[in-house]
Image (spheres, rainbow, N blue to C red):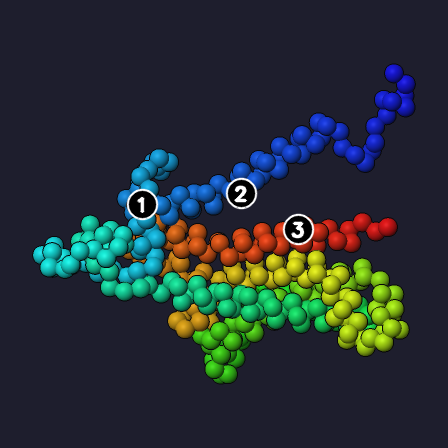
Amino acid sequence: MSLANAAHSVVEPSVGTRRFAGSLVVLYAVITMIPLVWIVLTSFKSPDDAISYPPRILFTPSLEGYCNLFTTRSRQTPEFIKTLGPPQGLCDNIARDRNMVIAGPSNYVPRFVNSLIIAFGSTVLAVALGTLSAYGFSRFRVPLKDDLLFFILSTRMMPPIAVAIPIYLMYRTLGLSDTRLGMILLYTSVNVSLAVWLLKGFIDEIPREYEEAAMIDGYTRFQAFVKVVLPQATTGIAATAIFCLIFAWNEYAFAVLLTSGNAQTAPPFIPIIIGEGGQDWPAVAAGTTFFLVPIVVFTVLLRKHLLRGITFGAVRK
C-alpha cells in the first residue's frame, strides 16, 4: 500500500473519532434528559408515590397532579359529600375519593398567560430594537462605536441583584410594580444588549453591495433594509429570539421581587403550589411540564435557524 493511499485528511475525522464523539453526544443527551423525564414521570404519580422512598420507577399513573394544578380543593365531611350529586368529571371524582370537593379554578392559568405575554412581548421588542441598533452600528460611522458597544455589552454583565433595589424603588414610584408592561420593559432592557451584539455579527456578514444595488434601483435606505437585509438576517434574528425568549421565560429573581399577583409569572408561582399536608409535588411537576411546552415548541420550530445562526460567520471564505 502506497503512502498516498495510507494518508488521511487532517480535517475530516476518522471513523473512530466520529464514533467516540457520537457516543459523548448521546451520553450527554441522556444525562441532561434524565431530570426532565423524572419531572414528567412525577407529574403522573400520586402524592404518596411522589414522596416514597426509595423512589418508585414503576407506579400506577394518575392525573391527580394535573387536577390539583388547575383546581383548588377544600376538605369536606363524608356526609356532606354524599349530599352532592354525581362527580362532574375525572378531577371531581379524584377529589371526592380524598374527601374533598373542587372549590374553583387555580391561579396557574393566569400566571401561565402572564409568562406568555411578558416573555414573547419582551422578545419581540428586544429583537426589533436590537435589529435596528445592530444595523446602525454595522452600516454607519457611529462616533465612539467600540466604546458604545462595550457599554451595551457591560449591561449584560451586571448581576441583577446589584440593581434590584433601585429598580424596585423606581417601579414603585412610577406605578409599574406588578404590571405586565413593567416586566416587558425590564426584560427588554436586559435582552436588548444581547440582541445588539448577536445581530451585529450577522448583519456584518451581509455584503453592503446588495443594499447599494437596491438603492441604485430606486429603493430608499429603509426599503433596502426591509427587503434586502432582513430576509438575509432571518437566521440570526431567529437564533437571537430563542436566546432572548429563554431568558425572559425562565427569569425568576425580578419576577419574585416586582410581581405578586396581577403580573406574576409561572416561575415564582410553581414552587409555592401547596397541597394538603405540604408541598404537592405531582402538581409542581405537572406545572413544570406545562411550562416546558412553549419553549420546546418554539425552539423546535426554529431549530434549523438556530443551528445555522450559532455557526453563522464562524468560517470566513
Please state the horizontal and vertical placement of residue 262, each as a whole percent of the image: 41, 73
Q: Mark 1 points at which residue?
A: 62
The kind of residue on which mark 2 rests is: Thr
The kind of residue on which mark 3 rests is: Lys
Q: Name the residue under label 3.
A: 304
Image side of residue 75 versus residue 51, left or right:
left
Disc number placed over residue 119 in the picture, else none: none
Image side of residue 245 versus residue 205, left or right:
left
| Vertical placement of residue 70 versus 53, above or below | below
Q: In which quarter of the image is residue 225?
A: bottom right
Q: In which quarter of the image is residue 128?
A: bottom right
Disc number placed over residue 32 in the picture, else none: 2
Camera-side residue of 109 and 265: 109
Q: Nearer the viewer, mark 3 or mark 2?
A: 3
From mark 2 to mark 1, how far is it between C-alphas?
25 Å
- The N terminus - image quarter: top right
The residue at 47%/75% (across/down) is 179
Pick whichever of labels 1 and 3 is earlier in the sequence: 1
